[in-house]
Amino acid sequence: MIVLHNARLIDGNGGEPVPDATVQIADGTIAYAGPSSGAPAVGDDHAPVTVDLQGNTVCPGFFDVHVHMSLPGTKGSPIMAAMVPPSYRYFQLIDRLKATVEAGVTTVRDLMGVDVGVRDAVAHGLIEGPRLLVADRMLSQTGGHADFHAPSGVDGTGIIGGSLVDTPDEARLRARELLREGVDVIKVASSGGVSSPSDDPDWLGAREELVAALVEEAANYGGRPVAAHAIGLAGITAAVKAGVRSIEHGYALTDELRKEMVERGQFLVPTLLETLHPDTATPQAVAKSTKWHEIAQASIRASVEAGIKIAVGTDAGLVPDHGTNLQEIGLLVKHGGMTPMQAIVAGTRTSAELCGVDGTLGTLEAGKTADVVVVKGDPSIDADLVGDNENILLVLKEGKAKSNRGGFMV
C-alpha cells in the first residue's frame, strides 16, 4: 500500500480542496481519499509506503481528449511521415507518449493517426505512456478535411490518417470496419479545416445524414461515441443535429446551438491551446488559422456560460507540442471565464465522462483506479500551475510512478 499524506486534496468533483488530506492506494486502486483525520488505520501486514507530499496538491490524473500522437507538433513536419517507413514512425511515438504522461496526462483520446495496436502496446506495458482511446482514422467526404490529395497528385490521405466516404452507405461500411478493428471512438469531419489543403472551416463537410449514419452504426456496435471535427457553423449544425457525442473545436457556435447541445447532453472540446500559434503546415493554413483562432478565443466564454459540458483537448501534435497539454487548463480560465476549480474538473471528471470511463477514472474516490498527479502549490487558486511541467512533481498511473520530479520515495 502507498499512503500519500500531508497534502491538499482536489478530488475532481469540484468541491473545496481538503487542506490536510491523505490518499491510500492498494493494488493500483484508491482505497481512501479524504481528510487525514478520517483515514483508516493501515496495518503492518500491508507494509505501507508512506509519502510526505510536503503540503503540495494531489489531483486525479488528467485527460487530453483530443491528441494526435502520430503528428510531431513543432518538432517536425507531417510531410516527413511520407519519407520514412511505418516502423520508424512507431518508434517516434515513444518520446511523445512519455512526454505526455510525465506532464500529468494519464489518459488521452487520439482522434486520428494511431491504431489499436499502439493502444494495446501501452496497456500491456510494452511502452510507457498514457492510457489511450483511439479513433485510428478521421472520415470525411472527398475534398473534405480528411482529404490530403496535393495538387501535384501526391496523396497523403492514408499516411496522415484520413479515410474518404461520400455516401451514408460508404460511411456505414467504413465505420463497421473500424469498429471491427476495435476502435474506441469514430471521428468524422463535418466541416472543413485549417490544415487540410482543399477546403475551409466555413464549408460543410460530412452532411447530417452521413454523420447520423455513423452515429447509428457506432451506437449499434458496442455503444461507441462519435466525435465531430466541426469549426464553422454549417459543420457544427450538421454534427449537433446528427447526435454526435462531442463537438471538437466548435468555434462558430451560436446561442441556439449551444442550447441544443445542453439539451442533448453533448460535449464541447474547445482546443484552445491549438489557437496560441498559427498552423504552419501550408501558407493556406497560416491564413486560415489566424482568422479562426481569434474566433475560437472569443467564443468559448459564451459556451461555458451556456452550461455546455466542457472537456479538455488540445490537438497536441498538430500545432501544440506533446507534453504541453495541461496549459489548456489555464486557457479555460483566461478565455472561458472558468474558475480554476471548474477548469480542473473539465480536465478530470468531465473528460472522463465524455470518454465513458467516469466509473473508474476522473476523480479520487475509493474504488477508482489510482491515477494520481501531485502538483506543486495550489492549482485551485492558480490554474496555470498545472501547465508548467516543473510543477508536476509526481505522476502515478494505476498506482505506479511514471514521473517523479519531486524525488518522493514511492
Image: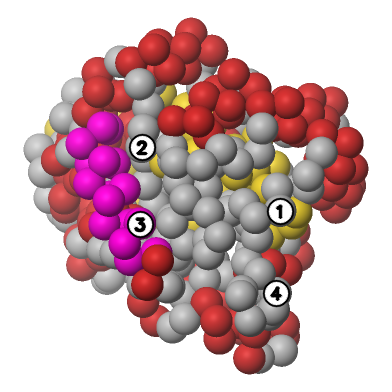
Q: CA distance from mark 1 to mark 4?
A: 12 Å
Overall secondary structure of the magenta section: helix
Q: Residue at x 20, y 61 (%)?
A: 388
Left or right: residue 185 versus residue 280 is: right
Instruction: Give the labeled residue for mark 1.
Output: 142
Instruction: Give the labeled residue for mark 3.
Output: 288
Residue type, numbered disc 1:
Thr
Q: Residues within 10 Å of mark 2 (few under 14, many from 20)?
A: many
Instruction: Give the labeled residue for mark 2.
Output: 251
Secondary structure state at the residue bearing disc 2: loop
Q: Residues within 10 Å of mark 1 (few under 14, many from 20)?
A: some
Percent x, y of residue 225: 67, 32
Q: CA distance from mark 4 to mark 3?
A: 22 Å
Q: Residue at x 24, y 18 (%)?
A: 305
Residue type, numbered disc 2:
Tyr
Relative depth, front residue between 212 and 143: 143
Earlier in the chain: of badge 4 and badge 2, it is: 4
Secondary structure state at the residue bearing disc 3: helix
Earlier in the chain: of badge 3 and badge 1, it is: 1
Q: Quadrant of the C terminus?
A: bottom left
Q: CA distance from mark 2 to mark 1?
A: 23 Å
Q: CA distance from mark 4 to mark 2?
A: 29 Å
Relative depth, front residue between 161 and 152: 152
- Which portion, as a residue range, is magenta? 285-300
Relative depth, front residue between 245 and 160: 160
Percent x, y of residue 1: 48, 49
Left or right: residue 274 versus residue 63 is: left
